[in-house]
Amino acid sequence: MKLCLSLIFLLHCWISPTYAQVFQLVEGSPVMSIVGSSTLHDWTVEAKQIEDYPAEVKLADLDLTIEEFSFRVAVESMDGGRGPAMNGKIKKALLAEQQPYVNYQMKDPVSVTLVEGVEVPFTAVGDLGIAGVSQTLDIEGGALLEDDKITFSGSKLMKMTDFGIEPPSAMFGQIKTGDDITVHFSFTYLKSE
């Protein structure tokens, strides 16, 4: 009888559906910045207002599939950390009045099998729209599971001119911004209780 009950219990465990664990976005996340250079110094722009991103992700065992992922960044919220003059140049270069948001929309689902404490690489293909120009990009990132937390992070090197943006200059052209920029991002989710 004990053997029969044990077999029934094991069979039940084997055929029971796997329940997904839900992870909610952590306060203070996401974080996004743009890093570039100029003839005077390197610079960083922080995105202060990021919207329309997934508020939660679900994990079945260690398998994670993200069917849809998108976000938008308010150009008005971009802060170069050097005062209104620099922020004004950012808004002008990105055509903030006509195109108030930078938009990203993932095109294909991303699936990864997470490993505790190991950053697992992934590639996301999606459309990035800046200043009215959209480009399809492959973005390399990593998914890290630590305790009850999942962090997605990565970066993408691109050129401003690929989006029709003229690199800003100052001091009557004496200070010139480099065309190359790198976008860094991080989204952190914590397991729900």
Image: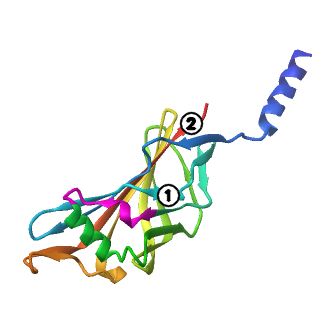
- Give me the C-alpha separation between circle 2 and circle 1: 21 Å
Residue at position x 43%, y 65% in the image: 139
Kind of residue indicated by mark 1: Glu
Residue shown at the point (47%, 69%) measured from the top left: 103
Instruction: Please say whether residue 61 is visible from this viewpoint.
Output: no
State the residue at coordinates (48%, 41%): 26
The residue singled out by tag 1 in the image is 51
* Image position of 183 with respect to 64: above or below: below
Of the numbered discs 2 and 1, the one sitting upstream in the chain is 1
Mark 1: secondary structure: strand
Tell me if residue 155 can be seen: yes
Q: Quadrant of the C terminus?
A: top right
Q: Quadrant of residue 156?
A: bottom left
> Relative to residue 83, is residue 187 depicted above or below?
above
Viewer-proximal residue among 15 and 133: 133
Residue sitting at the far bottom: 164
- Magenta run includes residue 80: yes
Locate residue 41 relative to residue 141 in the image: left or right: left
Q: Residues within 10 Å of mark 1 (few under 14, many from 20)?
A: some
Residue at (80% x, 37% y) in the render:
16
Residue extent of the magenta highlight: 73-83
